[in-house]
Image: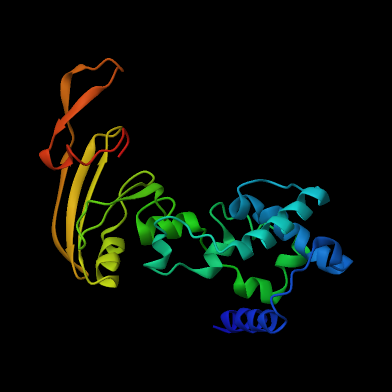
Amino acid sequence: PSCCQQIHQWYQMWLSEGGVYHSWDSLTAMQKARLSPLLSAGSFDWLNRFTGEDESRVATAWEDIQYLRGTGEAVPMDMRTLLPTSLAAELHGFNGRLWKTPEVIWRQACWQAFAPGNSTYHLYQCRYGVKWPNGSGFHCIDGGHATELSAEFDTPWGPPSAEVLCALSARFRCQVRHVYAEEGCGFCGYSEYDHGRLADHESDDIEFSDEENEDGFRDVTGPDYILDSLPHYGG
């Protein structure tokens, strides 16, 4: 709680300054010395790339974070908006590299008190049932009915947890039918939710044709409920 209060205080202070943008060149030498190892350790988790200890690359990472902060871009099918994530784990990162910082930093009492025990890899698997809690290749399908909405998306390497779909159904006070398939491993299933409650579910092995098609794959032949729900190979 004390760490969250401190972060909130800093955030409110930043807002009171009008959300001032601080370029890398405007930072003091001490600020750069503190930020460099943090950016070097966390850049892959935050920006999907390594900076190493090269100051020019660290500076570019800082500028990119400043840019992303102001875009307001949303993550497709972000499950963290349905089930809250952990701020400490998010900072810790998927690979858990943030806390692998120089001894002069991590030996500070305030740092030790804040450092979480797990990376987001562990958190996402436990809370959302998937490796990354968002839907890639996400797009909506307009079926022409005012009270219905369909969406397609992929997740690695299995379906989202029932808790995620329950939260989705509860959030919009609606019925949700979720169909999933993973042809590579040959499993599939469906679940139905009603206003936040799991109403029905089924899991099966995918049925394949005996002969391969012209692309070298065996066609999916069942169960019936997935035949019209596979936009492409994979799920």
Give residue 82's position: percent from left, percent from top: 37, 67
Q: Residue at x 32, y 54 (%)?
A: 160
Is residue 32 among the parts visible in the rendering? Answer: yes
User: Of 192 and 132, which appears nearest the observer?
Assistant: 192
Give residue 166's position: percent from left, percent from top: 25, 65
> Does 34 sit left or right of 96 as displayed?
right
> Does 125 sit left or right of 230 as displayed?
right
Quadrant occupied by the C terminus = top left
Query: For residue 25, which quarter of the picture?
Result: bottom right
Name of the residue lying farthest toward the right: 29
Q: Residue at x 72, y 47 (%)?
A: 51
Give residue 9's position: percent from left, percent from top: 64, 84
Q: Residue at x 32, y 46 (%)?
A: 158
Is residue 53 among the parts visible in the rendering? Answer: no
Give residue 226's position: percent from left, percent from top: 18, 40
User: Of 169 and 100, which appears nearest the observer?
Assistant: 169
